[in-house]
Image (cartoon, rainbow, N blue to C red):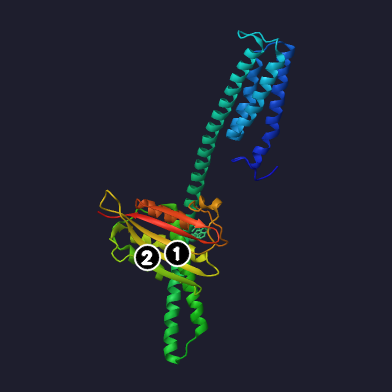
Amino acid sequence: MTEDSDLPGVSAKQDDKLPILAFTVILCVNLAIYINFFLGITVLYTHFFYVPILLAGMWYQRKAVYVALLLGVIHIVMTYFSHPIIENSLTGVAGGLIMACGRFAIFIAVAYVTGLVSEERKELEEKLLQAERLAAIGEFSSGVAHELRQPLGVISNSVYYLGMKLKEREKEKEVADEKVKRHLAIMEKEVKRANRLIMDLLDFARMPVPTLKVCNVNQIVEEALSSIEIPENIEAKKELKETLPTIHADFDQILRTCSNLIRNAISAMPEGGSLKLKTEEEKAKEKEKGNIEISIADTGEGIPKENIKKIFEPLFTTKATGIGLGLSLCKKYVEAHGGEIAVESEVGRGTKFIVKLPGSE
Ligand SMILES: Nc1ncnc2c1ncn2[C@@H]1O[C@H](COP(=O)(O)OP(=O)(O)OP(=O)(O)O)[C@@H](O)[C@H]1O
Ligand SMILES: [Mg+2]
């Protein structure tokens, strides 16, 4: 029994069902042989074959077609050998075989349709489960975030007070206590990080409606970049279109989108590399207003194909200290503006995120 089965959607639990299915197939074939060859009833036995086909459809989705193929072949062989016992309107071996082929096709169709229905039900169940899980996490995290806000505020005030006192003492004694200064800076940085996490958790729990105001996208990108410490081994390049029209957007939400994408890009380049921020206007042909595009590209580790679909899901992370909220929030923010976010990535070469925001009339 393996956790990772090659059958899509087949978990370890479903592997337990394989012996049951195999047993049902064997039982039905034996019953069919008995009814057909010993009782001489040739029309009844094929109905038994629907039991394993339906079971396979329910448990293994469209893979049930293989069970239908197997049973269809068994049925054709049995029809061939049961002749001349066969008594039906079509006479001769050929007639029996034509009917058997018809049933064969019905087996496949039943297996396919059952598999399809079961697949859809499974997807729906997974979505429902995911939604319930996220709602529970959201409720929990918003409670925790509220509780943490107050002590963090107190720490932040104390850090500010100590910083001031330190400056005063420096003036009096005219010596700088570099070690204390460094530790205060660390505390300030970590409090900021914790506050950011709290904001993320609160936004994850209840998506705030964007407050639209006239914004300059270049200014947002500049501010996002300046708010993040870029490591020395990373070269940041800007290619911001000067004549970019303003748009109606929530400054803070787009700023946080850009900051998240920049932070991700930086952590994808631990050995260094280049970070490119670009803005441009994508002119729509018929409409006056075009899309505003922000692209954030890195030359980092890239994203494996199997992860591309998952990166925008909440709580998906490959980082030891990550939470997996960043990209899911970026998507929420951008979509709340009527925009979209896309990703292009190649493992070992880098990643580019493109944010498209609708332009204003
Ligand atoms: N520029 C990038 N290059 C390579 N992988 C990336 C990049 N951006 C995102 N990813 C992948 O997508 C995952 C999800 O990113 P996301 O920002 O949602 O969460 P996180 O960065 O892991 O944690 P958090 O942002 O909550 O601190 C990351 O763990 C990483 O595997
Ligand atoms: Mg992130």
Q: Residue at x 54, y 28 (%)?
A: 113
What residue did someone put label 1 on? 262
Taking the image as shown, residue 185 lies to the left or right of residue 212, namely: right
Q: Residue at x 50, y 69 (%)?
A: 273
Across and down, in percent, residue 272 comes to: 52, 70
42 or 180, which lies in front?
Answer: 42
169 or 338, which lies in front?
Answer: 338
Image quarter where the N terminus lies is top right
Mark 2, Cα crowd under 10 Å, few <14 / some 14-19 / many 20+, is many
Q: Amino acid at mark 1?
A: Ile
Across and down, in percent, residue 243 comes to: 28, 64
Q: Say how many tags the image has.
A: 2
Mark 2: secondary structure:
helix
Picture quadrant of residue 74: top right
Residue 324 visible to an observer of this rendering:
no
Across and down, in percent, residue 327 comes to: 46, 56
Q: Amino acid at mark 2?
A: Val
Residue 90 vs 129, above or below: the answer is above
First in sequence, mark 2 or 1: give its number: 2
Q: Quick one: which residue is furthest to the bottom in this view?
A: 173
How far separated are the C-alphas under marks 2 and 1?
Answer: 10 Å
Q: Residue at x 49, y 70 (%)?
A: 190
Q: Is mark 2 in CB contact (under 8 Å) with mark 1?
A: no
Residue 156 visible to an observer of this rendering:
yes
Q: Is mark 1 within 8 Å of ligand 1?
A: no
Across and down, in percent, residue 293 comes to: 36, 58
What residue did someone put label 2 on? 221
Residue 279 vs 334, above or below: the answer is below
Residue 150 vs 334, above or below: the answer is below
